Image (spheres, coloured by chain):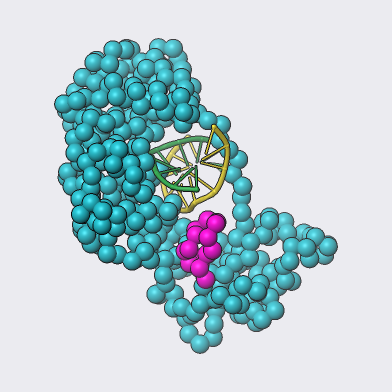
Chain colours: A cyan, B yellow, C green
Amino acid sequence: MKEKFFTRTLLQWADEGNLRRLPWKETKNPYLIWLSEIILQQTRVEQGTPYFLHFRKTWPTLQHLAKAKEDQVLKAWQGLGYYSRARRLLACAKRVQDEYGGRFPREYEELLKLPGIGPYTAAAIASFAFDQAVPAIDGNAHRLLARVFGIDLPPHSAEGKRAFRQMGARLISKERPADFNQAVMDFASTVCKPKPLCENCPFSQACTALLENRIAELPRKTPPKEKKKRFFYYLFIHLPFGKYHPIRQRPGGDIWQGLWEFPLIELPRPLKAARQITRTRAWKELGLPEVAARICHVHPPLKHLLTHRELHIQVLEVEAQALPEPLKTTCLITDTKNLPTFAWPKPLEKYANRK
DNA sequence: GACACGTGGTC
DNA sequence: TGACCAAGTGT
C-alpha cells in the first residue's frame, strides 16, 4: 500500500467524526496532555479517565502539582497500578517547574529527558500539544502498521522499533501530525482491534495481513513470560480500644514499594496446600507460627476478614508470639478512615463497604 | 535485551 | 478459571 493513500484515507476517516471525544482531547494544554499520557500508559481509557478528571480537579496546573507532596499524589493514584508513574509524574512536574520555568519543552528530544517520558509519550506531547510531526508509536500503532504494511518484526526488538518508527515517520501528515497520531490510535482501537472489524475497514483492499490471511500473526508477539504467583496473607488486627488497625509501609525492592498495607505473611504456596504439611518438618521450615494455620481464612479478598469478626479476636490473642519480628517493631496504629496511600488493588472503602 | 512494574476487562 | 492484553518506562 502506498503511504500517501494510507495517510489520506486515515485522515478522511478521522474527518468523518470517528475520533473519540475524550476530556484531554479538548485542549492543547501541554500539562493536561502530559498528565493524560502518563495516566494512560498501559492503561485503558475507561480505567484512566476518572483519574484524569480527579487529577485535573485537584491540581489544575503544573504549578499546583509541582507543589504537591508525594503521598498526596500516590493516594490519588491509588488503584491505578504502576505506582512509579505517580512518583515520576511528580518528579517531572518539579523538573519542568524548576528547570523550564514551568513550561514543557516543545522538542521531542528535550521531552525525552524528563522522568516518566519515553519515546511514545514524548512523541504524543510533541504532536498533540505542539503540532510537531513526530509519530507516536504505541501498541495500537504496532497493530495497525504491522497488519496494513506487513511489518513482520517483533515491535519491541531493536530492529522492530526502528522499522515501526521509520514507517511512522514516512506516514505522518506534516500538515496534521496531531490528527494523524490520534487517528492511528483511535482507528486501531475501534476498527483494527486485536480482533479486527475488517468488513468496515477502508484499508481492507490493500491490507497485507488480510490479503495474506495473517491477521492472527501480526503484529508479531513475543512469547509471554511466565508470571510467578505470590501468596499474601494479611493480618487485619482488630485492637480493642477503637477502630484502629496496625499497618506498615512496604519496603523497597518489591511490589507496591513504599505503599501502606496491613501486616502480612507471605507463603510460598496457597495456605490450603500449606496446611496439608502442617505436621511435617517442612511446615516448621516455613518459619510459620502455628497460629498461621488458624488464620487461614485471613486472606484477600479482604471482604472475608471484614465479615468474620471473631477472626480478628483470634489473631489478636496470639499476637505476641505469632507475628514475625518486623511486624512488632514497625507497626503503626491508624484509623482506617484516615489511611495514607494504600497498597490495595482498590481503595479500602470498596472492600469495607461490602457486607 | 530481558525483566519488573498493577489493575481490570474479556473470552 | 486462567490466559491474554491495554495510550510504556526504567533498570
Left or right: residue A312 versus residue A274 is left
Give the camera-side residue of A113 and A253. A113
Q: In which quarter of the image is residue A148?
A: top left
From this view, report whether residue A255 is shown above or below residue A136.
below
Left or right: residue A209 versus residue A24 is right
User: What residue is at 80 percent from the left and 60 percent from the top?
Assistant: A282
Q: Position of residue A326 (x, y in %)?
A: 62, 72
Residue A254 on the magenta span: yes
Q: Position of residue A157 (x, y in %)?
A: 48, 29
From this view, report whether residue A210 is shown above or below residue A66.
above
Q: In which quarter of the image is residue A16?
A: top left
User: What residue is at 66 percent from the left and 72 percent from the top?
Assistant: A324
Residue A198 on the magenta span: no
Left or right: residue A61 versus residue A316 is left
* Part of the protein shown in magenta: A248-261
Quarter of the image for the N terminus of chain A: give it. Answer: top left
Q: Where is residue A234 in the image (x, y as percent from the top left)?
A: 58, 66
User: What residue is at 33 percent from the left and 16 percent from the top?
Assistant: A204
Q: Where is residue A319 in the image (x, y as percent from the top left)?
A: 64, 79
